[in-house]
Image (cartoon, grey):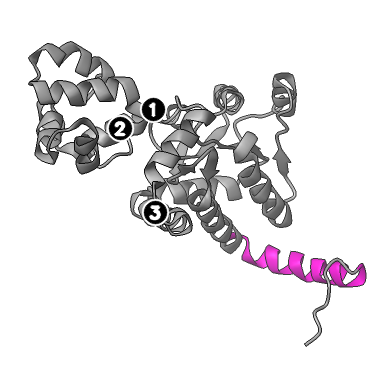
Amino acid sequence: MNHDILTLIQENIHTFSKGQKRIANFILDSYDKAAFMTASRLGKRVGVSESTVVRFAAELGYDGYPDMQKSLQKMIRNRLTSVQRIEVTNDRIGDQDLLSMVLQSDIEKIRMTLEELDRDSFEHAVDAIVSARKIYIIGVRSSASIATFLTFYFNLIFDNVVEVSANTASEVFERLLRVGEEDVVIGVSFPRYSSRTVQAMSFARDRGATTVAITDSEASPLAPICTYTLKARSDMASFVDSLVAPLSLVNALLVAVSRKKNDDLAHTFQTLEGIWDEYGVYEKVQE
């Protein structure tokens, strides 16, 4: 399905039945809400049966309602403002138990990430990172937490890690000034995607670096410009991005890289334990 679903609906609305036009008009007016409704709920909202909603999806050329819903969600992923996110989430949760819904959603995102992750891309990314001259890491806004976490542990494993500061556009390119073919640049970005991260990854790609995207889907603007794309499902809870599955993916990446550097890492941590103990970095818990 190559057409924008809203364009598709507008082009075919004159052929729809009365009930289908009600569905069409609701989607055109409130696509941000429709994208997260079940077929049953959408039907109730506009006053038609669930089967009418399913037939509507088929009429548009989709392989059932879930396929149409997926198309809607993909389309809006980078369009929703924070205010729209809050409205959509309130509509999704309704009278349900908020805590259970959010945690169950995070569990589901990890499960889907495990099923969908490209294992070859993951292994190739690990090999590239281990053999890189320099490892650059960039992630801004909500993705900065993932980038900082990754940088912290990579600094314990490697002595060639650069966290790319992104306070200004010029600062990004200054940090990447000497990036080249022997380097790896890791970009972390989830909806709403950061234009600064996309620009940085394009810059690195143009200079021959191996680029690794940690992002949510092939629809991400990072996917087409990166050598390897590691996909982790994310979701929104109100204006907050759920980064549980991305963090789990980063944990796996850290473990995979550390196993490749096992001998060096054991010596590093033996040294660190002595330093931490000498300078009281950690509190000693009394038994």
Q: Which residues are magenta?
A: 260-279
Q: Amino acid at mark 3?
A: Gln
Kind of element beneath mark 3: loop
Q: Which residue is mark 2?
A: 34
Q: Indicate which disc, 1 or 2, sits on the residue closer to the N terminus.
A: 2
Q: Indicate which disc, 3 or 1, sits on the residue closer to the N terminus.
A: 1
Disc 1 to disc 2, how far (Cα)? Answer: 11 Å
Tell me, yes or no, whether the highlighted magenta stretch contains residue 2.
no
Tell me which corner region of the image, top left, top right, bottom left or bottom right, holds residue 60. Answer: top left
Q: Which residue is mark 1?
A: 76
Image x and y of residue 64, in percent = 15, 38
Q: In front of the other: label 3 or label 2? A: 3
Q: In front of the other: label 3 or label 1? A: 3
Image x and y of residue 118, in percent = 38, 47
Crowd class of label 1 (few under 14; some 14 to 19; many from 20; radius 10 Å): few
Kind of element beneath mark 2: helix
Crowd class of label 3 (few under 14; some 14 to 19; many from 20; radius 10 Å): few
Q: Amino acid at mark 2?
A: Ala
Tell me, yes or no, whether the highlighted magenta stretch contains residue 263.
yes
Q: Could you tell me if residue 4 is visible in this image?
A: no
Q: Amino acid at mark 1?
A: Ile
Q: How many marks?
A: 3
Image x and y of residue 245, in percent = 48, 52
Image x and y of residue 217, in percent = 40, 37
